[in-house]
Image (tube, rainbow, N blue to C red):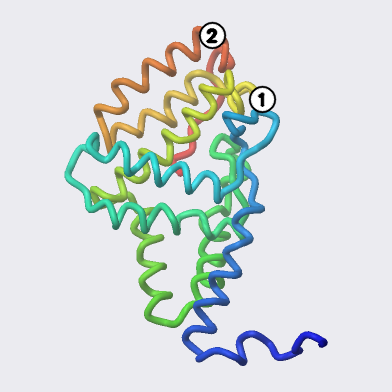
Amino acid sequence: MEPSSTPPAALLPERLARQIGFLMEIDKVKTVLRRNRVISEPARRENDAEHMYHFAIMAVVLAEYANEPVDLLRVLRMILIHDLVEIDAGDTFVYDLAAQAGKREREERAAERIFGLLPDDQRDEVRAAWEEFESEETPEARFAASIDRLQPLLCNYHTQGGAWKEHGISRDRVFARNSKIARGSEELWTHVSRLLEDAAAKGYMADGQAGSESTS
């Protein structure tokens, strides 16, 4: 028997068809490669789906260290949404200042297209969560942003420098980028900064100063 040529959307109610369409589209996030190396397989770069999974588990485990009480479900919603725009916009290496130019505009266009696949009410909810994460103005967003910085920091530390060493990123730039962890968790930054000092002592970062740090 030959398979039906009927498009899947024609078999579903419109709202469900749009929701399923969105869910199938975001499968592409599994193909977006980041600069970080997988700790258990350092020859391989992690993808955005792996990052978001690890990031989400870290937030669950470390929520007690947030500077302010946070709604964990709200934090997790932002985590699972925040990098979906990279399906279109690509991953922008935080230390690549040239690539940072136009990043916001690229991601705005991506948000419009990707979130727009959803029914209008869910489109607006998902877009609001993405905007909240980007603004870092709520306790939840500040904590999420801190863990978003902590996750690659730990990947780089546990792969003997990883992307820091591969791209010649200086100690000053690594500290400038990651000191922002304190905005969401001063306690985590107090402890994690010791890992960075150890990483610098072990030669996991380049010496000296190298340009200004991105705020993204």
- To which quarter of the image does residue 125 belong? bottom left
User: How many neighbours does mark 2 have within 10 angstroms: few (below 14), some (14-19), or many (20 or more)?
Assistant: few
User: How many neighbours does mark 1 have within 10 angstroms: few (below 14), some (14-19), or many (20 or more)?
Assistant: few
In the picture as drawn, the residue positioned furthest to the front comes out as: 1
Q: Which residue is mark 2?
A: 202
In the image, what residue type sits under mark 1?
Glu
Look at the picture and state if 196 lies above or below 48: above
Residue plotted at (58% across, 56% down): 86
Residue 18 position within the rendered picture, expressed as x and y whole percent measured from the top left: 52, 81
Look at the picture and state if 114 lies above or below 93: below
Q: CA distance from mark 2 to mark 1?
A: 15 Å
Residue plotted at (57% across, 16% down): 204
Residue plotted at (57% across, 29% down): 39
Image quarter where the N terminus lies is bottom right
Residue 132 marker:
none
Residue 87 position within the rendered picture, expressed as x and y whole percent measured from the top left: 61, 59
In the picture as drawn, the residue positioned furthest to the right comes out as: 2
Residue plotted at (51% across, 71% down): 112
In the image, what residue type sits under mark 2?
Lys
Pick whichever, 111 or 97, lies toward us: 111
In the picture as drawn, the residue positioned furthest to the top comes out as: 201
Q: Which residue is mark 1?
A: 166
Figure disc tally: 2
Q: Is residue 89 left or right of residue 171?
A: right
